[in-house]
Amino acid sequence: MLLALAQTKKILFFGGKGGVGKTTVSAATALARSQAGGKVLLVSTDPAHNLGHLFDRAIGPKPVRLAPGLDGLELDPDETVRLHLKEITSSLHKLMPVHLRGEVDKHMALSKDAPGMQEAALMERIAEVVEQGVKDYDLIVFDTAPSGHTARLMALPEMMSAWTEGLIKRQEKADSFAQVVRDLGRDSSMEEKTFSAESQDAEKMRESGIRGILHRRRLRFTHLRDQLSNKETTAFVIVLAAERLPVLESIELYAQLKAAQVNVAGLVVNKRTPEEGGEFMRARYQQEQAHLDVLTSALPHLPRHDLYLLAQDIVGADALSRFAESL
């Protein structure tokens, strides 16, 4: 199932409850696709990055080569927010009068810890990665944060597209009002006092700059929203363990992703207990089977692939390559 998805999709998201092995499964899928001849980008959006531990090397916010045909990067939320605010501050400094730059800096400093700032900045960074990545790579694989965080993240493009659209409409109304005032001023003796040629040009440049920023953001979020909802190019794989809480959380995650119009293409049950191996192992296997019956009953239409528990930890490209044979 996973190798077929990796061959036919441009973007794959892996998500699920924390600790179920999302990083290992997503990385093995990405490595297998690269070994089959594709150029792949593996991206971690989880603040608790594990890609570096898995590949036993340092990975940062810029793509690094992990194996032939496979690049990886880790999106640092704090660094993403810092760069996001730096870009916004720089743009506002160019658009606003010099005497207001201190107020801009003060507002940006307060915005740093505002609720939702990390998610918004991270989503914009993901949009950038997708926008460029679909041009440079055959496949982009996202190793996402635990379920709740990921579900909110997947719903953000639609929300932020609508929010940006609202800002654009408000800006257009403000621009129209400003133009009416300028037109009235041309027929008034107050023209020279209130609207010099320089001030009018500066105001028009400010309005044009704000419109440009808003339109770029709208296009970026619209592109990401369209990519996420495109079943031909994008799929989400839910990774879980055969235990009660991961099963119930996966059922909830599916409903949230469906509401966000994200295509869930399958389920991967990781770390299954082998049925053979004595009475304890058989009892554990049967308990897991009972939980998986609940999963199948709730999501009967989704294909499922079971991966069995291994005796050794998976570390490095060689171990991942061997693990990928079970995909």
Image: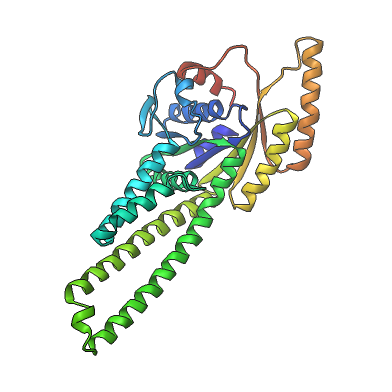
Q: Which corner quadrant of the image does residue 269 belong to?
A: top right
Q: Is residue 221 visible?
A: yes
Q: State how the image is colored.
A: rainbow
Residue shown at 32% from the left, 49% from the top:
87
Tell whether 24 sits left or right of 299: left
Q: Image check: 225 left or right of 213?
A: right
From this view, report whether residue 130 is shown above or below residue 99. Answer: above
* Residue at the spot 68% in from the left edge and 47% down from the top edge: 255
- Residue visible at 54% across and 46% down in the picture: 153
Q: Is residue 194 above or below residue 262?
A: below
Q: Position of residue 76 (x, y in %)?
A: 43, 35
From the viewer's perspective, is 107 left or right of 248?
A: left
Which image quarter holds the C terminus? top right
**The N terminus sits in image quarter:** top right
Residue 147 relative to residue 188: left or right: right
Give how far across and how far down residue 66 sits, in percent. Answer: 39, 25
> Is residue 230 in view from this perspective?
no
Q: Toward the viewer: 19 or 308?
A: 19
Nearest the eye: 59 or 66: 59
Q: Position of residue 167 (x, y in %)?
A: 44, 65
**x 38%, y 50%: residue:** 108
Q: Nearer the viewer, residue 249 or 231?
A: 249
Q: Say which of 193 and 220 sits in front.
A: 193
Tally of numbered discs: 0
Residue 195: x percent and y percent? Answer: 22, 78
